[in-house]
């Protein structure tokens, strides 16, 4: 069985509405998580390493991917969302693929040991899901700008089978929505 779990990086600065982005030291840093984002990154550790909701489809990943920071997309949010979980599980985060490199990332994800967790930028997640599972995958075309609290799960029993899709609401922090989109 193959399982790929995809999440958006944790909270970022939203036009002054959600506080300022800060680095690990709490200093202002433009391409970082907000305080709430750091809280989510911490909460994701137990969420993925010790899942408690039976039947949710959440499992501890054996491989973790996060988008790479580049000159054109210098965000460290995906890597810093994944890092606490990776440290807990003793996994090195693969961050060799930038946002926009979904086809190459899909090949690496499919070659990695399952289950896999991918932490990505919301406006590229649909492209990633299609690159992994094909154009027929029944997932939303757009990830809402204000949602950081959902997991997309792609699964198939054998390499010859088609992929299934489902969403799970994380419900980790105050204000998380119990509904998926």
Image (cartoon, rainbow, N blue to C red):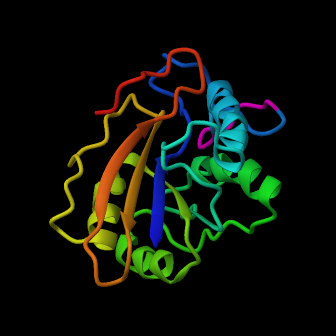
80 magenta-colored = no
Q: Quadrant of the C terminus?
A: top left
Of residues 20 and 137, the one nearer the viewer is: 137
Quarter-of-image position of residue 117: bottom right
| Image label count | 0
In the drawing, does residue 28 fall left or right of residue 145? right
**In the image, residue 170 lies at what x, y percent?**
51, 33
**In the image, residue 151 lies at what x, y percent?**
45, 44
Query: What's the magenta bit mostly, secondary-structure-wise?
Result: loop
In the drawing, does residue 145 fall left or right of residue 53? left
Of residues 34 and 164, the one nearer the viewer is: 164
Give the vertical position of 137 relative to 96 (above or below): above
> Residue at left 84%, top 35%?
25
> Residue at left 47%, top 65%?
3
In the drawing, does residue 139 fall left or right of residue 51? left
Residue lying furthest front in this view? 54
> Residue at left 54%, top 33%?
12
**In the image, residue 116 lies at what x, y percent?**
55, 65
**In the image, residue 104 lies at what x, y percent?**
41, 80
> Residue at left 63%, top 25%?
36
Q: Range of the magenta residues?
A: 26-32
């Amino acid at each position: 069985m193959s399982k790929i779990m995809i999440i958006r990086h944790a909270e970022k600065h939203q036009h002054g509405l959600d506080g300022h982005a800060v680095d690990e030291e709490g200093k202002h840093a433009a391409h970082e998580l907000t305080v709430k984002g750091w809280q989510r990154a911490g909460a994701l550790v137990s969420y993925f390493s010790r899942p408690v909701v039976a039947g949710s489809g959440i499992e501890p990943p054996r491989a973790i991917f996060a988008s790479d920071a580049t000159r054109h997309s210098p965000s460290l949010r995906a890597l810093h969302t994944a890092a606490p979980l990776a440290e807990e599980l003793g996994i090195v985060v693969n961050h060799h693929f930038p946002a926009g490199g979904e086809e190459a990332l899909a090949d690496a994800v499919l070659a990695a040991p399952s289950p896999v967790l991918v932490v990505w930028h919301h406006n590229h997640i649909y492209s990633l899901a299609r690159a992994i599972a094909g154009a027929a995958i029944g997932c939303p075309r757009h990830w809402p700008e204000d949602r950081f609290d959902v997991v997309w799960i792609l699964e198939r029993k054998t390499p010859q089978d088609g992929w299934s899709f489902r969403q799970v609401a994380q419900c980790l922090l105050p204000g998380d929505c119990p509904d998926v989109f």
